[in-house]
Image (cartoon, helix red, strand yellow):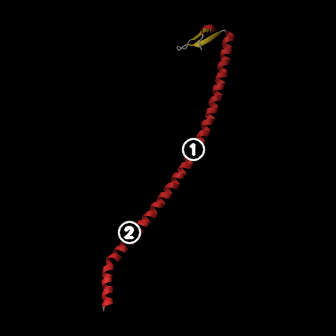
Amino acid sequence: GKTEKETKNLDSVLEPYRAENARLVQENNKLHQELLKLKEESDQHIKDLKRTIRKLEHDTADLKFLNNQYVHKVRCIEKESKAKTEKIQQLQEKNLQAVVQTPGGRKRTIPFRRQRM
């Protein structure tokens, strides 16, 4: 009698909560799956970025190495150039005159004392 009626009454009171609970559990599971998917995508993106960083660091190291080689080569060429310039000046002083090519293509001999270098 009375307990069966109370149970039925209790069930009718609880039913909306049970339905809401089932809906919330389903929504929670869906959100959890989405979160896991996003985390996986994020982890993959981080891995890709780290790989890109490593590649760029290697490229940078290679370029620094090449740059140092070129700087060394430029210094050697500048040193050779300076030595050749000094040799040319010695030879010009020895001859006491210099041959200057004018823009017109003609060569003129001028006394050394008039030169300005």
Residue located 40% across and 68% down the image:
28
The numbered mark at residue 59 is 1
Amino acid type of the residue that numbered disc 2 sits on in the rendered structure? Glu
Residue located 66% across and 9% down the image:
96
Quick check: 76 above or below 17?
A: above
The numbered mark at residue 27 is 2
Quick check: 38 above or below 21?
A: above
Q: Quadrant of residue 80?
A: top right
Residue 32 point in image, percent of width and height: 43, 66
Front residue of 71/30: it is: 30
Q: Quadrant of residue 29?
A: bottom left
Amino acid type of the residue that numbered disc 1 sits on in the rendered structure? Asp
The answer to whether 100 appears left or right of 16 in the picture is right
The numbered mark at residue 10 is none
Going from the N terminus, do you reach mark 1 or mark 2 first?
2
Classify mark 1: helix, strand or loop: helix
Front residue of 30/62: it is: 30
Front residue of 46/87: it is: 46
Residue 75 point in image, percent of width and height: 64, 29
Disc 2 residue crowd, few under 14, some 14–19, many 20+, Cα 10 Å: few
Q: Nearer the viewer, mark 1 or mark 2?
A: 2
The answer to whether 8 appears left or right of 46 in the picture is left
The answer to whether 83 appears left or right of 20 in the picture is right
| Real-space Cα separation, disc 1 to disc 2, in angstroms | 48 Å
Q: Quadrant of the N terminus?
A: bottom left
Residue located 47% across and 57% down the image:
42
